[in-house]
Amino acid sequence: MIRVTENLRKIRNLLAETAENAGRSRDSVKLLAVSKKQPISAIVEAASAGQRDFGENQVQEGIDKITEIADPRITWHFIGHLQTNKTRAVAEHFAWVHSVDRLKTARRLSDQRPAELGDLNVCIQVNVDEEASKSGVSFGEARELAAAIVELPRLRLRGLMCLPAVRSDHEAQRRPFRRLRELGDDLRDAGIPVDTLSMGMSDDFRAAIVEGSTIVRIGTAVFGPRS
């Protein structure tokens, strides 16, 4: 039996200790519990244990969970690749989108976001390792896209997200995260107010936190294997 509440306690402590060891405050890193393919009961248990942020990467699965759980305490994040024909559904149900990589997508989210829901928080996905198999913009394109997004209504540009290639060495893991942090610094220097670095998962969150991650995305360590 997966003990979601106990898993959450351990992970929160681990994130806090890693942040503290990196010279940061213990509460400077938010845990985003990736609930893809996880049962409703596990999400409800996590919410009862105080977890407030959940990430989904399939649009319909996420909407089904949002509708069934209907817990106003929960903040839902869309973290998967977003096709333009599904932007309306995401704009109408989620509070965050971590994977914006085209201006067309951003414009559709802006146009389709219901005003009564408030601004939709968005992050730009950057393809830090220039992998053909992954979505995301280049570092140069990210600056241009960020400047365009901040002009759109009903969106709030929060920051940057990445999914780097797998690396086993801690120092090697730090490099792409460092580049993303430096890009965030460049955006702020250019007058674009970003405050979020969505980077780090189960195998590399320590390196991500050292390099300034503010949101780490962890699933299996919270919920156990996906069904």
Image: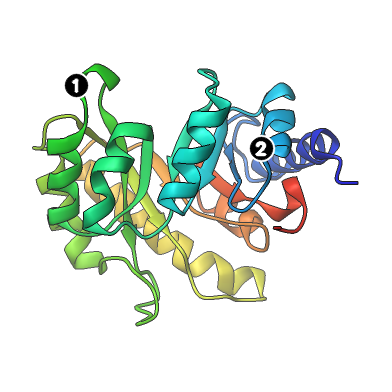
Residue 213 seen: no
Q: In 3D space, how far apart are the residues under numbered discs 1 and 2 (Cα atoms)?
A: 29 Å
**151 over 131 or under it: above or below:** above
**54 over 206 or under it: above or below:** above
Q: Secondary structure at mark 2?
A: helix
Tell me residue 150's x, y (percent): 15, 38
Please name whichever residue, 17 or 71, is drawn nearer the observer in this view of the structure. 71
Please name whichever residue, 26 or 60, is drawn nearer the observer in this view of the structure. 60
Residue to which mark 2 is pinned? 40
Count the numbered circles shown.
2
Tell me residue 30's x, y (percent): 57, 36
Residue under the point 72% across and 35% down: 41
Tell me residue 170's x, y (percent): 65, 68
Residue to which mark 1 is pinned? 115
Q: Secondary structure at mark 1?
A: helix
Please name whichever residue, 147 or 2, is drawn nearer the observer in this view of the structure. 2
Residue 35 horizontal side relative to residue 222, left or right: left
Disc 2 residue type (three-letter): Ile
Residue 37 seen: yes
Q: Residues within 10 Å of mark 1 (few under 14, many from 20)?
A: few
Disc 1 residue type (three-letter): Ala
Q: Which quadrant would the C terminus be assigned to in this image? A: bottom right
- Considering only order in the chain, which callout, 2 or 1, is on the residue closer to the N terminus? 2
**58 over 92 or under it: above or below:** below
For the residues labelled 1 and 2, say whether their Cβ atoms are less than 8 Å apart: no
